[in-house]
Amino acid sequence: MTHLLPTLPYAPDALAPKMSRETIEYHYGKHLQTYIDNVNKLVAGSPFESMTLDELVVKSDGTLFNNAAQAWNHTLFFEMLTPTPKPIPDALQSALTRDFGSVEAFKEAFAKAAVGLFGSGWVWLVSNGGELEIVAKPNAGNPLTDGLKPLMVLDVWEHAYYIDYRNRRADFVTAYWDLVDWEKVKLG
Ligand code: MN
């Protein structure tokens, strides 16, 4: 199958100024496009050619894994942003309170993991058999490889924030809370 750049559910300038049009143009338009192009080139003529991105993440390794996981991770990241954030749905609020003590405590722990992750990587909210957990993964890491279900993700590679926030990753994480689409967190 040919893997395609996912369509953004918002205009490229809709998240500005918290995430600028320039960041979307580079991060989505160039970085994500390149990962997808690389996957298509790497699977061509191989047994991986018929696999979905989910299957590739679980079954490949090396360069193919890196590109497939980066394509997967970015797809979820961009799909879960919105220019019009709404309150956290009751069911999610209850689950976060159950497993982290409160929504604020969850956000604090998630931000700490995001700021504390050395180098490039991703911070995830995952379901571990129904229990919510925060997982920080370096590089292209994806929780599917650990049998965990990804629920939301924040990209903390420098390319995600350097245009808008330069070296201030913590400010990017703070801005993320104003962009995340809680309604796309699928608990079930
Ligand atoms: Mn990225």
Image: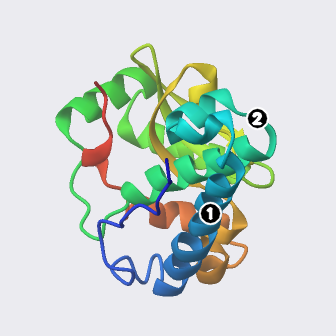
Pick the residue in front: 29 or 156: 29
Using the numbered discs, state the Cα–Cα distance from disc 1 to disc 2 in whole angstroms.
17 Å
x 36%, y 67%: residue: 8
- For label 1, the residue is 37
Pinpoint residue 97: horizontal percent, then vertical percent. 34, 28
Query: Label 1 crowding class (10 Å Cα cut-off): few <14, some 14-19, many 20+?
Result: some
- The answer, for residue 76, to whether it is visible in the render is yes
Identify which amino acid the numbered label 2 is placed on.
Asp
CB of residue at label 2: within 8 Å of ligand 1?
no
- For label 2, the residue is 61
x 52%, y 81%: residue: 25
Query: Mark 1 or mark 2: which comes first in sequence?
Result: 1
Q: Quadrant of ligand 1?
A: bottom right
Quarter-of-image position of residue 80: bottom left
x 46%, y 63%: residue: 5
Pick the residue in front: 4 or 102: 4
Is 188 located above or below residue 105 in the figure?
Answer: above
